[in-house]
Image (spheres, rainbow, N blue to C red):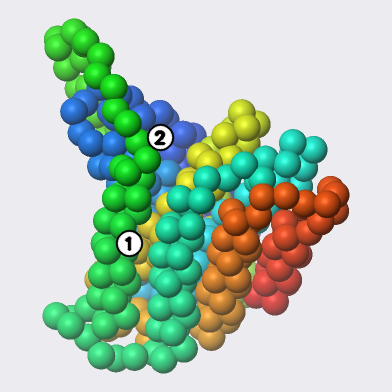
């Protein structure tokens, strides 16, 4: 009976989190339009946080309740699910061959994502206790690479973008900005609460059903917290905006790895990298493999037929189901 209650809470929290995250993304976009903040700050940072906030809150709350497998499993599982969604939709829209029209500038994001994924895998293998100011050396390294990577990506994108100025009514824009900021904060609080509920109910499900925390965090919680990303990717591809879709996935994945370092700060039993299930290493490596698949797609400019076009996506989708079967 308890298990059914926890499952009901989990489903309810997932629905609330997804709906709130959609509204969060909408208002983050409005903040970008109505403020003088740079495109880098609003797009790369604010929107990245907006779409990844469910994963962030789940990861942090799981570390607070001392369940490292859900904390890290959610982050890595969200990365895998994001890739699964991207490749599954590529197969669905195969007739349009959208991925043949991807901008090369995503290679920078792919390289940074791959480096972060490899560092994560190494951290999970080494279980290193080396720390700097009570924060694991692995976490410090991830933060450093993330910051440097964001600067590189920002510079690469700014070299390609041009800006235009339009006359705006200061009072109207100010009122709209205040409204959007208020709504952004409101939905952030809602996601924090629902994300915490996902972690707590997921932890309770693991204890009451006997399913491992790695499976709960890496599969169920990760899927629930990644629904907003999936909806965003589908919308982008349906509108033939493949660059937005891939940019969303790679940016979200980078932030999900950064979230692991934040979880390390909140984990009270020492370094979160010391107390994780070995299965998480395989999830991290599959994430690196799928990142390479995305980079292959980015550099590809033609295919002979439909089968050769969807082959990378088919391999990626099968890889996801293999890791799900292995973890469960």
Gap in Å between the C-alphas at discs 2 and 1? 23 Å
Q: For the residues carrying marks 2 and 1, which lies nearer the camera in this image?
A: 1
Residue 169 falls left or right of residue 308: left
* Image quadrant containing the C terminus: bottom right
Q: Residue at x 25, y 70 (%)?
A: 144
Between 44 and 20, the one nearer to me in the picture: 44
Residue 323 falls left or right of residue 183: right
* Image quadrant containing the N terminus: bottom right
Between 157 and 39, the one nearer to me in the picture: 157
In the structure shown, which secondary structural element does the residue marked by tag 1 occupy? helix
- In the image, residue 305 sits, relative to residue 259, either above or below, namely above
Query: Dot 1 corresponds to which residue?
Result: 149
Viewer can see residue 285 = yes
Q: Residue at x 84, y 48 (%)?
A: 306
The reply to whether the C-beta atoms of the residues labelled 2 and 1 are less than 8 Å apart is no
Viewer can see residue 219 = no
Q: Position of residue 88 (x, y in %)?
A: 71, 50
Q: Residue at x 21, y 15 (%)?
A: 173
- In the image, residue 285 sits, relative to residue 274, either above or below, namely above
Q: Position of residue 122 (x, y in %)?
A: 44, 84
Residue 180 falls left or right of residue 273: left
Q: Position of residue 128 (x, y in %)?
A: 34, 91
Query: Dot 2 corresponds to which residue?
Result: 25
């Amino acid at each position: 009976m308890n298990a059914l209650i926890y499952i009901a809470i989990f489903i309810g929290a997932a629905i609330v989190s997804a709906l709130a995250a959609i509204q969060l993304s909408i208002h983050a976009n409005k903040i970008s339009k109505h403020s003088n903040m740079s495109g880098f700050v609003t797009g790369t940072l604010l929107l990245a946080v907006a779409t990844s906030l469910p994963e962030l809150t789940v990861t942090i709350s799981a570390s607070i309740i001392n369940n490292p497998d859900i904390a890290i499993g959610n982050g890595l599982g969200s990365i895998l699910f994001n890739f699964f969604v991207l490749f599954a939709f590529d197969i669905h829209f195969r007739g349009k061959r959208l991925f043949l029209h991807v901008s090369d500038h995503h290679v920078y994001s792919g390289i940074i994502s791959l480096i972060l994924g490899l560092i994560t895998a190494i951290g999970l293998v080494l279980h290193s206790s080396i720390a700097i100011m009570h924060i694991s050396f692995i976490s410090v390294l991830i933060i450093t690479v993330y910051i440097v990577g964001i600067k590189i990506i920002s510079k690469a994108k700014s070299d390609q973008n041009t800006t235009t100025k339009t006359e705006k009514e200061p009072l109207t824009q100010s009122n709209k900005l205040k409204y959007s900021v208020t709504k952004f904060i409101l939905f952030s609080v809602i996601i924090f609460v629902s994300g915490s509920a996902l972690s707590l109910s997921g932890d309770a499900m693991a204890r009451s059903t006997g399913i491992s925390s790695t499976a709960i965090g890496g599969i169920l919680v990760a899927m629930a917290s990644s629904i907003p990303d999936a909806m965003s990717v589908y919308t982008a591809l349906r509108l033939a905006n493949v660059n937005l879709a891939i940019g969303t996935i790679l940016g979200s994945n980078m932030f999900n790895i950064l979230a692991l370092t934040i979880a390390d700060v909140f984990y009270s039993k020492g370094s979160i990298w010391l107390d994780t299930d070995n299965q998480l290493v395989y999830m991290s490596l599959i994430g690196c493999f799928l990142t390479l698949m995305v980079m292959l797609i980015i550099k590809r400019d033609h295919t002979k037929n439909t089968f050769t076009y969807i082959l990378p996506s088919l391999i990626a989708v099968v890889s996801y189901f293999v890791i799900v079967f292995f973890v469960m």
